Amino acid sequence: MRQISLLFIICLLFLVLNGAESQTCNPSGKIRGRKPPPGQCNQEHDSDCCVNGKLYTTYKCSPPISGHTKATLTLNSFAAGGDGGGPSECDNHYHSDDELVVALSTGWFANRKRCLNYITIYGNGKNVKAKVVDECDSTMGCDSEHDFQPPCPNNIVDASPAVWKALGISDPDNVGEMDIYWSDA
């Protein structure tokens, strides 16, 4: 009886560990950075520009989504001429910095499945609902389509200044990034 219990526990432990491993998000590859042509990388809000020859990790996935998914909030302008580059992927429009809008890392963007849906962001002791209008591409970067910026990490909620303001951060440029949680609204 004792051997059967031990065998059962070992099998159960194996299944739990295997299940946890299948929930991870491993890198999908790397891309080599190219130096942007003069004036081609908008560094508004301290956005990074690709470094020539540097290897950047890419992801096709994001961490698993729960009712309270941990993420990093970053700042992005979705306005014409802003550091977000072209118009938003979901609606092919630019959005004012006064709109509560976000871009999600590739895995969370889920091939446009979250387009124009709302998420709730929890941070700084507050919460705000924001509309998903774009993808923060975790699979590509360092090219003109991505404003010569590196691929996005796989755990990013890239938010407009209005989202930061709603979370009580009046000057997000001074903060840079913030640990948050989010959920589908």
Image (spheres, rainbow, N blue to C red):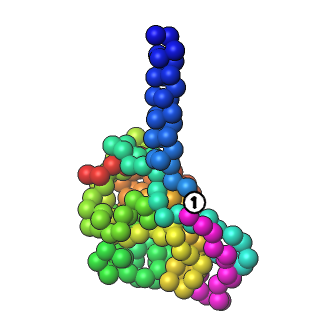
Q: Is residue 122 above or below residue 4?
A: below
Q: Is residue 84 visible?
A: yes
Q: Is residue 78 above or below residue 72?
A: below
Residue extending farthest to the bottom is: 38
Residue extending farthest to the top is: 1
Q: Which of 121 and 70 is in front in this view?
A: 70
Horizontal side, residue 123 vs residue 112: left or right: right
Residue at the (51%, 44%) spot, across then down = 21
Horizontal side, residue 176 vs residue 128: left or right: right
Q: Is residue 101 visible?
A: no
Residue at the (36%, 76%) spot, across then down = 89
How many marks can you see?
Answer: 1
Q: Nearer the viewer, residue 20 or 182?
A: 20
Q: Give the range drawn in magenta.
A: 27-42
Residue at the (46%, 51%) spot, across then down = 63
Q: What element carries label 1?
A: loop
Q: Main secondary structure of the magenta part?
A: loop
Residue 73, image x, y percentages? 47, 55
Q: In this view, does 92 lie above or below 77?
A: below
Three-letter amino acid code at the position of disc 1: Pro
Q: Where does label 1 land, which residue?
A: 27
Residue at the (60%, 78%) spot, across then down = 142
Q: Which of 97 and 138 is in front in this view?
A: 138
Horizontal side, residue 123 vs residue 176: left or right: left
